[in-house]
C-alpha cells in the first residue's frame, strides 16, 4: 500500500491510496534494477538527451569513450561537450530523429580525441523516446567504439596497397635497358601513390662516359635522371633539371642517404629542414611555397653498391611519411636499383 496527501488549488485536502499486488511491485522493481544495471555496466556508450539535445543521463561507458565525466555532460549539448569534433551534422540528424521518429542506425564517425591525441572510430545510433501517450520525451543514443577494428581495416588496406604497388613496380620498372627510361618508370610508379614529387638522382661517377672517379674526394656529383610530380607545383623549378650534373654538399639529406646507405626520413619538414633538402636558398623558398611538409630519401643499392637516391616529397597528401612508407619505398628502390644497374652495365658495355 502507498498513501499520500494531496492539496487542491482551493486548499481542500484529499488522500490518495495506491494498492498493488506484491508480485507486480516486485516485477517492476526487478525491471527497473535490471535496466539501471544494464545502463551502468553496458560496454556500449548510452545517453539520454532532452528535446533541446542536452544530456540528462550518461553511462560510464560513454564517459570513457568521450573522455569526459558525466558531470561534464549533464545540461550540455554534444557540440559543447565535444567541441573538437564536427558534430554540427550529427546534431542535425538528431533533430530529424526527434521530428520524424525514424531512428538512425550505426552511423560511422571518425575523429581525434584530445584525451589521447589519437584517431578514433565509432558507430552511433539515435532513437526517439516517447511515453505511453506518444509524447516526445527526448532522444536516446548508443555509441560503440570500433577504433581497433577501424585501425585493423586501415592496416589491411595499406598492406594490400603495398603488395599491389610492389607487383606493379615489378611489371613497369625495367622494361628497357635504358637508364633514363628506367628511372622515369620508377617515378611513375611512386607518383601519386606514395609521393607528390619524386626524383631519381644517380652518382655521376658510376654512369657510362663519366669523367669523375667514384673514389674522388669532395662533394659527390649527382646526375638528375628523372622528375615526376602529381600536379603543377613550384617544386618542379626547385629540382635539378633532368640530365644536369650537380655537386651535392655533405649537409644535404640526399647526400647523407647516398653516403650512409640508409633512408633519411623527415616526417614533418621545418624551415631548417628545407635548407638541407633544397640545393640553395631560392629552391628552399620554392619548396616552402609548394607546401612540402614531409620528406623521404632512399638510397638505390644494387649488388652492395649505392647507385643514387630516390628523393620523395609530399605537398597535397596530408599524411606525413612514416616508418611503413620508408619500408615500402626501400623495397621498391631495391627492385628498381637492380634494373638501373642492369641498364648501367649494358650502357657501359655499349659505350666501350
Image (spheres, grey):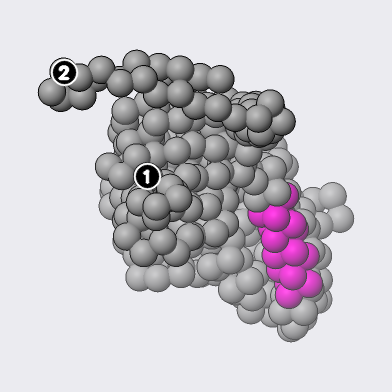
Magenta span: predominant SS is helix
- Whether residue 168 is visible here, answered yes or no, is yes
* Circle 1 residues within 10 Å: few <14, some 14–19, many ≥20: some
Instruction: Provide the residue span drawn in magenta.
Output: 151-169
* Circle 2 residues within 10 Å: few <14, some 14–19, many ≥20: few
The residue that disc 2 covers is 11
Establish if 50 lies above or below 351: above
| Nearer to us in this view, 53 or 279 | 53
Q: Quadrant of residue 119?
A: top right
| Nearer to us in this view, 34 or 6 | 6
Left or right of 188: which side holds 279?
A: left
Q: Quadrant of the C terminus?
A: bottom right
Establish if 90 lies above or below 340: above
What percent of the width, then of the height, locates residue 194?
59, 60
Dot 2 falls on a residue whose secondary structure is loop
The first of marks 1 and 2 along the sequence is 2
Q: Quadrant of residue 270?
A: top left
Q: Quadrant of residue 168?
A: bottom right
What percent of the width, then of the height, locates residue 178?
69, 79
Q: Quadrant of the N terminus?
A: top right
The residue that disc 1 covers is 137
Q: Residue at x 34, y 40 (%)?
A: 50
Circles 1 and 2: CB atoms closer than 8 Å: no
Amino acid at each position: 500500500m502507498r498513501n499520500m496527501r494531496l492539496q487542491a488549488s482551493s486548499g481542500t485536502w484529499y488522500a490518495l491510496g495506491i494498492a498493488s499486488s506484491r508480485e507486480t511491485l516486485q516485477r517492476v522493481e526487478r525491471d527497473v534494477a535490471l535496466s539501471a544495471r544494464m545502463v551502468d555496466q553496458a560496454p556500449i556508450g548510452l545517453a539520454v538527451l532532452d528535446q533541446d539535445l542536452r544530456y540528462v543521463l550518461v553511462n560510464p561507458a560513454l564517459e570513457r569513450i568521450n573522455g569526459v565525466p558525466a558531470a561534464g555532460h549533464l545540461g550540455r549539448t554534444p557540440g559543447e561537450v565535444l567541441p573538437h569534433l564536427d558534430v554540427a551534422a550529427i546534431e542535425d540528424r538528431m533533430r530529424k530523429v526527434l521530428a520524424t521518429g525514424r531512428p538512425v542506425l550505426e552511423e560511422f564517425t571518425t575523429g581525434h580525441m584530445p584525451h589521447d591525441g589519437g584517431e578514433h572510430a565509432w558507430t552511433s545510433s539515435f532513437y526517439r523516446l516517447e511515453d505511453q501517450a506518444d509524447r516526445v520525451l527526448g532522444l536516446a543514443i548508443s555509441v560503440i567504439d570500433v577504433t581497433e577494428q577501424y585501425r585493423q581495416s586501415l592496416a589491411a588496406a595499406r598492406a594490400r596497397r603495398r603488395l599491389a604497388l610492389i607487383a606493379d613496380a615489378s611489371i613497369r620498372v625495367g622494361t628497357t635497358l635504358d637508364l633514363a627510361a628506367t628511372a622515369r618508370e620508377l617515378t611513375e610508379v611512386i607518383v601519386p601513390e606514395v609521393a607528390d614529387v619524386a626524383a631519381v638522382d644517380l652518382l655521376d661517377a658510376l654512369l657510362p662516359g663519366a669523367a669523375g672517379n667514384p673514389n674522388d674526394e669532395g662533394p659527390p656529383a649527382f646526375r638528375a635522371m628523372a622528375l615526376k610530380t602529381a600536379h603543377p607545383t613550384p617544386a618542379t623549378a626547385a629540382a635539378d633539371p633532368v640530365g644536369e650534373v650537380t655537386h651535392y654538399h655533405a649537409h644535404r639529406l640526399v647526400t647523407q642517404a647516398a653516403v650512409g646507405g640508409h633512408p633519411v626520413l623527415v616526417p614533418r619538414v621545418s624551415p631548417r629542414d628545407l635548407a638541407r633538402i633544397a640545393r640553395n636558398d631560392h629552391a628552399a623558398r620554392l619548396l616552402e611555397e609548394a607546401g612540402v611538409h614531409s620528406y623521404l630519401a632512399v638510397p638505390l643499392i644494387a649488388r652492395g653498391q649505392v647507385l643514387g637516391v630516390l628523393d620523395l616529397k609530399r605537398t597535397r597528401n596530408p599524411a606525413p611519411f612514416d616508418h611503413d612508407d620508408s619500408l615500402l619505398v626501400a623495397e621498391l628502390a631495391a627492385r628498381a636499383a637492380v634494373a638501373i644497374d642492369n641498364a648501367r652495365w649494358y650502357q657501359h658495355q655499349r659505350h666501350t
